[in-house]
Image: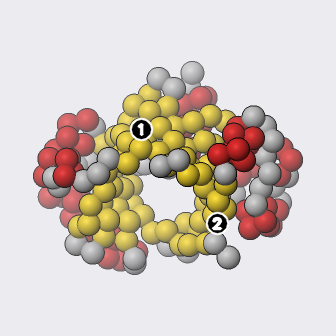
Amino acid sequence: MPQEVEIEFKNLLTKAEFDTLYTILKMEKEPEIQQVNHYFETKDFQLKQHGAALRIREKNGEYQSTLKQPYEDGLLETHDTLTAEQANAWIQGEITLGPEIRKQIQELGVCTEELAYGGRLKTIRRETAYYDTTVVLDRSEYGDTVDYELELEANTFAHGQSVFQSILVDYDITKRKTPNKIQRFYDSLENR
């Protein structure tokens, strides 16, 4: 089954904090990754009620649908690869879920026929290895909003949490409640 468990830590940043980390971590040496997330949900937010999220990520001309669900110390991600034509069909309202994601959504009790396109979020990302973790700096645009985010991906919760806390303390970064990108995207729609 195309699944993986992701352990990550996130913190929204001010532009100044983002610029500081960008310089200290020498992110200008890392390749810029551009990606667009297309989000899908039911009108009454059935996925959100289960802490789940469904997206298509468009990156380097490739498309992958992903369902994220809470799982132990991280997130369970279920993936299906899509063609450009399939991704565009989803955006136009013809959502044809792959078998793995369909199964997971149905197990949640969510009606797959009620899924609809919510919109897109564009991210410019740079990442680097850092003390046996991966540090990611994201600049995301959605609607009229631009935000900056630090993500840290780790193999274990304890190690990731330790490295993440060290970054916040060492670089005097305020710890902020940081909803995931899909939550921030949908919250921005509600606030318009």
User: Residue at 42% of width from left, 64% of height from top?
Assistant: 8
Q: Quadrant of residue 139?
A: top left
User: Residue at 60% of width from left, 42% of height from top?
Assistant: 38
User: Residue at 40% of width from left, 76% of height from top?
Assistant: 155
Residue 187: x %, y % from top left = 56, 35
Residue 84: x %, y % from top left = 65, 46
Q: From mark 1 to mark 2, how far is it between C-alphas? A: 23 Å
Image quadrant where one finds the N terminus: bottom right
Q: What element carries label 2?
A: strand
- Say left or right for 132 vs 82: left
What residue type is disc 1 on?
Ser
What residue type is disc 2 on?
Thr
Q: Name the residue under label 1.
A: 140
Residue toward you, 174 or 82: 82
Residue toward you, 69 or 56: 56
- Say left or right for 10 vs 41: left
Image quadrant where one finds the C terminus: top right
Residue 138's place in the image compared with 134, above or below, is: above
Residue 59: x %, y % from top left = 49, 49
Q: Quadrant of residue 188?
A: top right
Q: How crowded is mark 1: few (under 14 residues within 10 Å), some or many (20 or more)?
A: many
Q: Name the residue under label 2.
A: 78
